[in-house]
Image: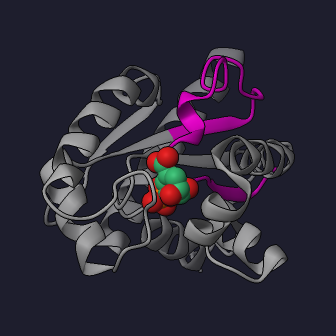
């Protein structure tokens, strides 16, 4: 944990981005640097139901999953000093990125469809919306194109290619300090 976060501990960080962009790893690195609470929404749902997201999609369907994910994400976003990591589809739910609480700072982890498919395939067959095999890239390109306008609304855009989570966590902290510092100056 770094010392002296009192200038930014009134915010909450929301990490958005496509599947396999590295949101979970970055969330963990940022939590390590700050000591803030990490809310990894998919892991939270899996722990609550004792099975994988892929299994929950199969058993209850996507609309059920989306409402579960949405409820838990919105609850976590009400808190401060928190890092909230929903799955890649949450940001594209209607109105979500446009109507966030004032203390939420958003970060988009950019990844190409090609890298996302490659990384996802290394992690095993865990993303029901991508599927496996040659159609996965088509599905990723289509979904990414649909979602990019929502991700783009984030306050900070970070390229993830070849970058380590701890490096990206440092960049987020720098961004928060700059932003909260200039907001304070404007208020004076
Ligand atoms: C999804 C992303 C997944 C998971 C589910 C649906 C999506 O999370 O929530 O498979 O629609 O983009 P990650 O973004 O962590 O892969």
Which segment did they paint magenta? Answer: 80-106
Image quadrant assignment for residue 17: top left
Residue 1 as seen in the image, left or right of residue 130: right
Residue at image position (59%, 40%) is 90
Residue at image position (20%, 66%) is 163
Q: Quadrant of the N terminus?
A: bottom right
Q: Let me know if residue 98 is in the magenta part.
A: yes
Q: Quadrant of the C terminus?
A: top right
Image quadrant assignment for residue 183: top right
Q: Vertically, is 9 above or below 188? A: below
Closer to the camera in the image, 65 or 85? 65
Total labels: the figure holds 0
Closer to the camera in the image, 181 or 38? 38
List x then y, in percent, for residue 48: 83, 75
Q: Let me know if residue 156 is in the magenta part.
A: no
List x then y, in percent, for residue 52: 62, 76
Residue 19 as seen in the image, left or right of residue 24: left
Q: Which colour assignment does the render follow?
A: one colour
Q: Vertically, is 103 above or below 58? A: above
The single residue placed furthest to the front in the displayed view is 59
Closer to the camera in the image, 34 or 157? 157
Q: Is residue 88 visible?
A: no
Residue at image position (25%, 72%) is 121
Q: Name the dominant secondary structure of the magenta segment.
A: loop
Q: Is residue 47 visible?
A: yes
List x then y, in percent, for residue 30: 52, 68
List x then y, in percent, for residue 8: 66, 49
């Amino acid at each position: 944990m770094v010392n002296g976060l009192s200038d930014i501990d009134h915010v909450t960080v929301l990490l958005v981005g496509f599947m396999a962009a590295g949101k979970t790893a970055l969330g963990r690195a940022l939590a390590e640097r700050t000591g803030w609470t990490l809310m990894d929404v998919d892991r939270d749902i899996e722990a609550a139901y004792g099975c994988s997201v892929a299994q929950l999609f199969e058993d209850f369907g996507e609309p059920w999953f989306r409402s579960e994910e949405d409820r838990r994400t919105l609850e976590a976003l009400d808190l401060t000093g928190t890092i909230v990591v929903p799955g890649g589809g949450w940001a594209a739910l209607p109105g979500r990125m446009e109507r966030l609480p004032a203390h939420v700072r958003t970060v988009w982890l950019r990844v190409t469809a090609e890298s996302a498919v490659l990384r996802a395939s290394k992690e095993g067959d865990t993303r029901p919306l991508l599927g496996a095999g040659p159609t996965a890239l088509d599905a990723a390109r289509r979904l990414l194109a649909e979602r990019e306008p929502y991700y783009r609304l984030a306050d900070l855009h970070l390229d993830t290619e070849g970058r380590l989570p701890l490096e990206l966590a440092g960049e987020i902290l720098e961004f928060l300090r700059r932003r909260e510092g200039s907001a304070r100056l404007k208020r004076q």
